[in-house]
Image: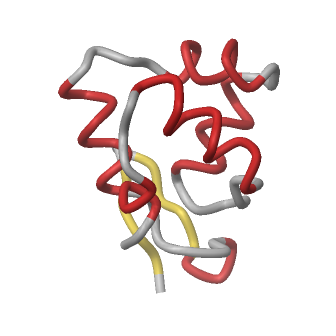
Amino acid sequence: NNVIYKRSVVKLETLKHKPYMKLKGKMKENNIIANDLAHLLNISSTAVLQKINGQSDFFLSEATKIVNEYNWKYEIFLN
């Protein structure tokens, strides 16, 4: 099984979870890019993209920083 995401194919077996579509939507809605979250979390933009796209997980502390910084609700991390 494969998933096509932004013109690249990702094997479902490599995903830890489904991509965070609500988070992606909020980011787009607020003109926030992965680099903005990377700066906030003090990690690389590649690491942020891997977390958003389901290849790794956000730590609770990272989710809390995002929620607090942008005044969002934790439900953006629920699929």
Q: Residue, x 69% and y 12% (percent of image)?
A: 39
In the rendered view, tell whether residue 48 sits above or below residue 73. above
Q: Nearer the viewer, residue 55 or 57?
A: 57
Q: Residue, x 55% and y 79% (percent of image)?
A: 12
Q: Residue, x 18% and y 27% (percent of image)?
A: 29
Instruction: Classify residue 61 as left or right of residue 27.
Output: right
Q: Position of residue 15 (x, y in %)?
A: 63, 72
Q: Quadrant of residue 76?
A: bottom left
In the rendered view, tell whether residue 21 sits above or below residue 12. above
Q: Nearer the viewer, residue 2 or 73?
A: 73
Q: Quadrant of residue 60?
A: bottom right
Q: Position of residue 26 (x, y in %)?
A: 27, 37
Q: Nearer the viewer, residue 7 or 42?
A: 42
In the rendered view, tell whether residue 18 sits above or below residue 68. below
Q: Quadrant of residue 74?
A: bottom left
In the rendered view, tell whether residue 43 sits above or below residue 19. above
